Amino acid sequence: MSASPADLVITGCTVLVHEEQEEIGFRTDAAIVVRDRVIESVTTAASARELPALERIEARGQVAMPGLINCHTHAPMTMLRGLAEDLPIEEWFNDVVWPVESNLTADDVELGARLACAEMIRGGVTCFADHYFHMDAVAAVVAECGLRAHLGEAYFSSQGPEGRERSAEFALRHRGAADGRITTALAPHAPYTVTDADLAATAELARRHGLPVHLHAAENRDQTDTSLARHGRTPIEVLDHAGLLDTDLLIAHGTGIVERDLPLLARTGGRTAVASAPRGYLRFAWPATTPVRALRAAGVPVGLATDGAASNNSLDVWEAMTLTALTQKAAEGDPRWLTARQALHHATVQSARAVGLGSGVGTLAPGRRADIILVDLTGPHTQPVHDLAATLVHSARASDVRTTVVDGRVLMRDRELLTLDLPAVLRELGHRLPALTDRSHGRRIQEYDA
């Protein structure tokens, strides 16, 4: 270790570690030493006791984990939380969400992003993959508040070639921004709103510029059936035909992925991953969830996600982890799948791989970026602890996160947000809501017909 003071030392905690064969383990009475935004060592509390540090956190009774990653969301949609309830997805889009989104300005998006980032920091999310509009505003919020983000400017073919060009221009301009905390992607909306020609052009742009692609596909089984009836191809086969399976591709949802899609996904030319947001599937009464077991067997990482707060009512990745474990048990009819340790693996390593950051985050190990959360397990709902993994997955809550660190910077300490003024955000949101939710104009940004 260097003789100069460490930037941060977290000591006395239990550290979640990833062992051989990607097993989850725990080191007790441990310490984490952070220097120059990376983890220098995971050591014993005794060895770090006298180590000089610019900042020190005593974390007895807490578990240190890699920060959670929200692999697919629409952060500014926090402003639409609870606005479109108890509706089928076509009515949800056509009658409420897309009319309201036609009102959005860049200022609205910035405000929604501030609220979302505050929620995610408080819930232990250190990185999120966002797919939305006016993304310059989201990037500015990320740079200010200290989170890590994978951002894409969404587009529909109905916008003409300008939509695709704007998505590419954003991705190239912001790639590596915020001291490297921002990565970017091309962001076509979905195969049912983007033409085959535009999907192929996106694949070409991705290859030319070395950019990943983030889109919705095979969101539910109805979309797969409709695609087969209209085109003779599943949505995954449409992506393959367009060349997108040869890019680094993040597919949102995938509950409509069927058996004939799996060989294509298993032999992709790029890094293909799926983001699963199980609460939304329950909310829309979809008959299936993301086929995690089959995708895992095909070698496809499955990361955890919330989708936007308009469909999920929450940006709680902790809840997504719990629901993933439970819905997989129900879907497979097997209580031994998904185990708590497997769920933690999806929440950490696989989520990091899904957003293209597998070499930098997702584990607490020397050389990794210092994205760390501290979880307090002293509450009555988490005691006693017989199986620490099960306690984290099935008993702990987002509100048990005490401290959130990104790139070695403390964004929340002892539940106090340090980089965002939440009361100011809420005051401004209250002023904006009447104009934001107006639907009397009769406009929609798009038509849902999948």
Image (cartoon, rainbow, N blue to C red):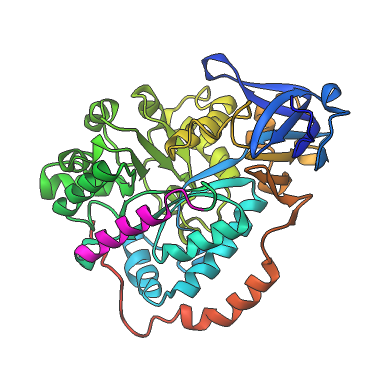
As drawn, is 138 to the left or to the right of 103? Answer: right
* Position of the C terminus by quadrant: bottom left
Q: In the image, which residues are magenta?
A: 161-177
Q: Position of residue 235 (x, y in %)?
A: 22, 44
Up-down relation of residue 307 to residue 326 (above or below): below
As drawn, is 372 to the left or to the right of 293? Answer: right
Give whichever of 185, 342 is nearer the camera: 185
Q: Position of residue 415 (x, y in %)?
A: 76, 52
Q: Residue at x 58, y 41 (%)?
A: 68
Q: Quadrant of residue 393?
A: top right
Give whichever of 233, 44 is nearer the camera: 44
Tell me, yes or no, whether the highlighted magenta stretch contains residue 37: no
Q: Residue at x 49, y 74 (%)?
A: 107
* Position of the N terminus by quadrant: top right
For the stretch drawn in magenta, what is the main secondary structure? helix
Up-down relation of residue 78 to residue 235 (above or below): below
Give whichever of 210, 312 is nearer the camera: 210
As drawn, is 81 to the left or to the right of 100? Answer: right
Q: Residue at x 31, y 62 (%)?
A: 90
Tell me if I can see residue 417 in this picture.
Answer: yes
Up-down relation of residue 146 to residue 432 (above or below): above
Q: Residue at x 20, y 45 (%)?
A: 204
Q: Position of residue 164 (x, y in %)?
A: 25, 59
Tell me, yes or no, whether the highlighted magenta stretch contains residue 176: yes
Q: Position of residue 155 (x, y in %)?
A: 29, 60
As drawn, is 294 to the left or to the right of 335? Answer: left
